[in-house]
Image (tube, helix red, strand yellow):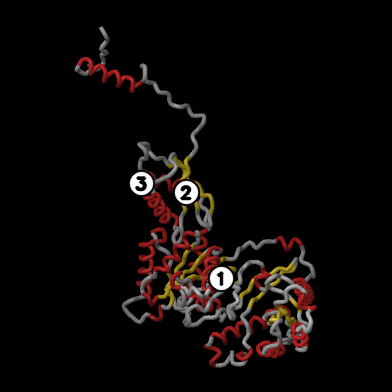
Amino acid sequence: MCKETNRSGGAIVTPIAGTTRDRRECIGRIGSTFFRLIDTAGVDGEKLDVAFGKKGKTSLDGAMIRQTMEAARSSDLVLLMFDARLGVTSDLAETIRWLRKISNAPNPADSESNGDENHHREIVVIANKLEGDRWASMGENYVLDNLNEVSRAGFGHPIPISAEHGEGMVDIAVIIEKLTREKRLRLGLPEEIEEKVKNVKSEIKPLQLAILGRQNVGKSTLVNSLLGEERVIAGETPGLTRDSISITWLWKKWPIQIVDTAGIRRGVKRERSNEIEDLAVLDAMRAMKLADVAVLVLDAQARVIQRQELAIADSVVREGRALVVAANKMDLIVDSDYTKTDYANAVQEQIELRYPMLRRTPVIPMSSLHGKNVWKLMPVVLKARERWERVIPTGMLNRWLEEVLDEHSPPMQLGRPTKIKYIVQTKGRPPTFLLYCNVPELPINYLRYMTRSFQDSFDMFGMEVRLVVKKSAENPYAKKSINKTTGVGGWQGRQKRMVASFKRSGRPNQKGRRNRKR
């Protein structure tokens, strides 16, 4: 239903039970109504009471239930969905019993804004998997019996929908529109949003930050440490994260859109029978393509960067994103002679050896579990985005080009000297530059030399600098050179006559004299 309502194709949907684990937020829209939608994991009624116990704090099921509970507490409207073909199950009955307890509980986000802690939380029951209207006219209809049984719970009659086919969304839109007007009236806001307010765009665009890496390197723990709360499920078990969880966050005065992604393994190591991991990897790569800066999290216990991590870094660069490396789990290195600086330098050397364009990429040693050096990450990320979207004046670029050409001129091609006339920046994000030359392309070695000099001059590290060569058009008003050779046939004709004269006389012609036939 989250995928149908949002229409962004974000949530991973499979017929396997328990696919969703974390709560995933998105902006939904039905008609002209916008709202914040939270997709949660399925509730196991038998484990509701033990979610906050000792076993629940360490188990995956307990973490999933706590995420669902937190989403319900922070909502104005709770849509309780069940399978209408199964009817009332023990899980549904326990969930209804728990929702009764929180129906009148204050909403933390709402109480902070207006101080009204007696606000009633709306709970609507949704009967899913009811395609069409044939189910309502069948004899001995067990579906109607299930709907009547659920309606005795006290939350009203269930709304029949089909999330897969998008049926029944109109009824949900009416409820959302009604609650939206009531909330705006309660907060003292106008019922209708003015057109001027709709067209206003934020001057400061949120920084799109993607957290990437292999499985079990501490990506979710790093996100929780940055946010200061248990926002995503984290643990020692590899592969806990499936959906790419996007979280809006304000760091100091900067709006951040941080995305926690699933661990990326090589294709040969994935389980062929489980399509969830493939969908999770595709979701992680989609998050990387939409990001401004990608943070590659490494496991410091390995002491060296793995091949899969180098492949992820290569994907980030090819996509044109800025890269920052976070060396996690530094607290597990017990060798006193091996310091954080040694590991950071070793990682930089390995990345530069494989990808020279990524030399001097920022590497931050940290321990996200204990919160050590985590605060150093965001300043580096903001500087990386600043470099990534930087626009360099054309005059400064051409002064740099003159220095580069004076130091090392480009090699000749086809017997002609190569001339680079000028350079301009076509765009940022990623930084792309156009070189106007008298040849269609430059040698790859010279382009690498120019890229290295450009990175040193303008501090463009941790990203790809794209130098595109374009052959400048010939001047149509320039006078073409005229061949001033004299004689019939030009120099080729003279050469033929000299060869014929040598064959006749047996001696070469003297310079400046022409042998005439007698």
Q: What residue appears at the point 51 percent right and 29 percent down from the top-left corner?
A: 477
Give the position of the C terminus as an image quadrant.
top left
What's the residue type where badge 2 is placed?
Val
Residue at position x 79%, y 74% in the image: 178
Q: Is residue 486 left or right of residue 377?
A: left
| Residue reaching furthest to the left | 506
Give the spatial CA distance, label 1 vs label 3: 43 Å
Q: Which image quadrant is residue 51 in?
A: bottom right
In-front residue for pair 484/16:
16
Q: Nearer the viewer, residue 239 or 207?
A: 239
| Residue at the spot of label 3 | 407
Residue type beneath disc 3: Glu
- Residue 373 position, x and y percent, is 45, 76
Q: Residues within 10 Å of mark 2 (few under 14, many from 20)?
A: some
For marks 3 and 2 on the same chain, the one whose residue lies earlier in the sequence: 3
Estimate the spatial distance between the alpha carbons at disc 2 and disc 1, rounded to whole Å. 32 Å
Quadrant of res 90: bottom right
Tag 1 residue:
258
Describe the element under mark 2 as helix, strand or loop.
strand
Picture quadrant of residue 121: bottom right
**First in residue order: circle 1 vs circle 3:** 1
Front of the two marks 3 and 2: 2
Residue 468 image label: 2
Question: Judging from the image, what secondary structure is the residue with disc 1 in?
Answer: strand
